[in-house]
Amino acid sequence: MNTAVSALSDPTPLPDGAGDAGSPPPVTSGPLTPPPDSAGTPAAAATARHTVAEDVQGLLLATLTASLGLAVFADGGLVIGGMAGIALMLHHALGWAFGLTFVLVNLPFYWLAARRMGWEFTLKTFCAVAAVGWVADALPRWVSPAEMSPLYAAIVGGALTGLGILFFIRHRASLGGVGILAVYLQRSRGWSAGRIQMGFDAALMTLALLLFEPGQVLYSAIGAAVLSLVIMFNHRPGRYMGV
C-alpha cells in the first residue's frame, strides 16, 4: 500500500513534508472556523490528559471568552464565518435568538463528530455550543453594551472569539460546524480542510452582501481575519496538542 492510500485510511494528520506528492496535506486550521485538528488522533491520545478540574476551568474560560466575542459581533451588527456566522445572519435578518439558532444549525454535525472524533469530543462540543449560545444571548441583560466603532468591534470580537475557540481546542472541544465536516473530508477524501472552510466562509460573506450593507460585510471580514490569525499563530499541529 503506497503512502497516499495509507494517509487516507489513517486519520492521523501527517507532519509537514511527509508522504509523496499525492498525499493529502496535514490537517490545518482554516481561515475562519479552524477545526480541532488534534482531536481524535493518536498524537492527542499520547499527550498527558487534562484533569477534570483543568477541563472545567478551561471550558468555562472558553465559554466566557467566545460568548463575549460573539456578543460583540451581534451588538455591532456583524457576522463571522461558519455556523456562528449563519446563526448571526439569521439573528440580524429575522430577529431569531442567536443562542438557540446556533445550537440548531450545529445539530447535523454532531453525528459526524461522534463517528470521527469520539463521544467525549462530541459531548464537550455540544455543551460548548449550547453554553456559548446561552451566555451570548444573556450578556446584554447582564452588561450594558458599550458604544464602539465597527472596526473596533470587528477586531475585539474576532480576537475574543478566536481565543475562546483556541481554549476549546486545547480542551478537546470546539464550536462545531463546518470545521468538523472539513476535517472529515480531509481525512476521508484528502481534500484540504482549510480550503473547504475558506470556500464556505467566502460563500457566506458573499451571501451577507445581499442582506447587509457593504461596510458591515467588510468589517465582518476583518473580524473573521483577526479570528483566523489568532488561531493560526497559536495553534499549530505539533506545537500544542491539548487533550
Image (cartoon, rainbow, N blue to C red):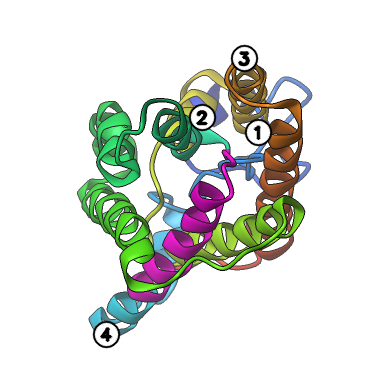
- Is any atom of residue 193 visible in this view? yes
x 46%, y 23%: residue:
188
Q: Is residue 115 visible?
A: no
Label 1 sits on residue: 194
Residue 162 vs 103, above or below: the answer is: below
Say which mark, if any, is on residue 53: 4
Judging by the rendered image, the residue that carries numbered circle 2 is 182
Foreground pick, 237 / 14: 237
Gap between marks 3 and 1 measured at Cα: 25 Å
Q: Which residues are magenta?
A: 59-80
Predominant SS of the magenta segment:
helix
- Badge 1 density bin: few <14, some 14–19, many ≥20, Cα 10 Å: many
Compared across the picture, whether 173 is left or right of 211 comes to left
Q: Amino acid at mark 2?
A: Ala
Under mark 1, the amino acid is: Gly
**Quick one: label 3 or label 1, which is nearer the N terminus?**
1
Note whether 226 is above or below 189 in the view shown: below
Q: For marks 2 and 3, give the one nearer the viewer.
A: 3
* Mark drawn on residue 210: 3
Q: Identify which residue is drawn at 63% across, 55% down.
A: 158
Quarter of image, res 46: bottom left
Between the residue at mark 4 and the residue at mark 1, the CA separation in whole angstroms equals 32 Å
